[in-house]
Image (cartoon, rainbow, N blue to C red):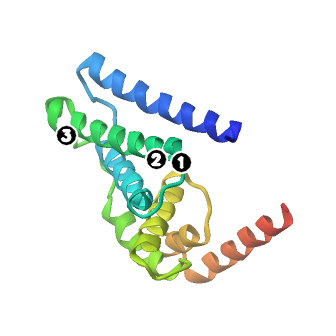
């Protein structure tokens, strides 16, 4: 077991549990983006579809199931249990501006044209875009939403050169 993976997984799990406890104790989901939590549920669901096809370890399988269950529990608390405290007017993120291009880009940037690989790439691009981590697909997504294609290609080449120079 890699100690860094264990530390990362446990700190991520602690953050999710703290969020769930905050919502439950305060009986309110004010200030929490329901759309972002919905995107997390989508990312975890599509990223962990390999649960049905391969078994790596009991730890890996249980952590994937816990992440999926916690993300859907958060969505349930926001949209069902404490719906009266959720202010959708302040949750102005336009999900369609992320989902549509990510769906298209995941067809272009993948290793294999299988449904499992497509789902994994879609969740990877979506998560990287939400966390502002550059990837070739997220650079192209920026080009579609914000910049011209020539600027995006230059940015992608710069990202690739930085990646190769860091090794």
Which of the labelled discs sits on residue 61, or is there none? 2
Q: Nearer the viewer, mark 3 or mark 2?
A: 2
The earlier-in-sequence mark between 3 and 2 is 2
What residue sits 47% from the left and 65% below the top? 120
Q: Are marks 1 and 2 in contact (CB under 8 Å)?
A: yes
| Residue highlighted by disc 3 | 79
Alpha-carbon span between mark 1 and mark 2: 6 Å
Q: Residue 2 falls in which quadrant of the image?
A: top right
Q: Position of residue 49 (x, y in %)?
A: 39, 60
Looking at the rendered structure, the number of numbered marks drawn on it comes to 3
Relative horizontal placement of residue 153, taking residue 32 as reference (left or right): right
Real-space Cα separation, disc 3 to disc 2, in angstroms: 27 Å
Residue 20 lies in quadrant: top left
User: Which part of the image, by quadrant, shows the N terminus?
Assistant: top right
Which residue appears at 54% of the width and 74% of the height?
140
Identify residue for label 1.
Answer: 57
Q: Secondary structure at mark 1?
A: loop
Secondary structure under the numbered disc 3 in the rendered image: helix
Residue shown at the point (44%, 59%) measured from the top left? 47
């Amino acid at each position: 077991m890699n100690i860094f993976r264990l530390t990362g997984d446990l700190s991520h799990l602690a953050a999710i549990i703290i969020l769930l406890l905050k919502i439950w104790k305060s009986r309110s989901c004010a200030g929490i983006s329901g759309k972002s939590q919905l995107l997390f549920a989508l990312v975890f669901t599509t990223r962990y579809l390999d649960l049905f096809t391969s078994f790596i370890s009991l730890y890996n399988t249980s952590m994937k199931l816990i992440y999926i269950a916690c993300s859907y529990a958060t969505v349930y608390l926001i949209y069902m249990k404490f719906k009266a405290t959720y202010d959708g007017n302040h949750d102005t993120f336009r999900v369609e501006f992320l989902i549509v291009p990510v769906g298209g880009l995941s067809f272009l940037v993948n290793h294999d044209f299988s449904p499992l690989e497509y789902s994994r790439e879609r969740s990877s691009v979506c998560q990287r875009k939400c966390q502002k981590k550059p990837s070739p697909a997220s650079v192209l997504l920026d080009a579609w939403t914000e910049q011209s294609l020539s600027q995006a290609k230059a940015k992608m080449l710069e990202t690739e050169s930085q990646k190769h120079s860091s090794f």
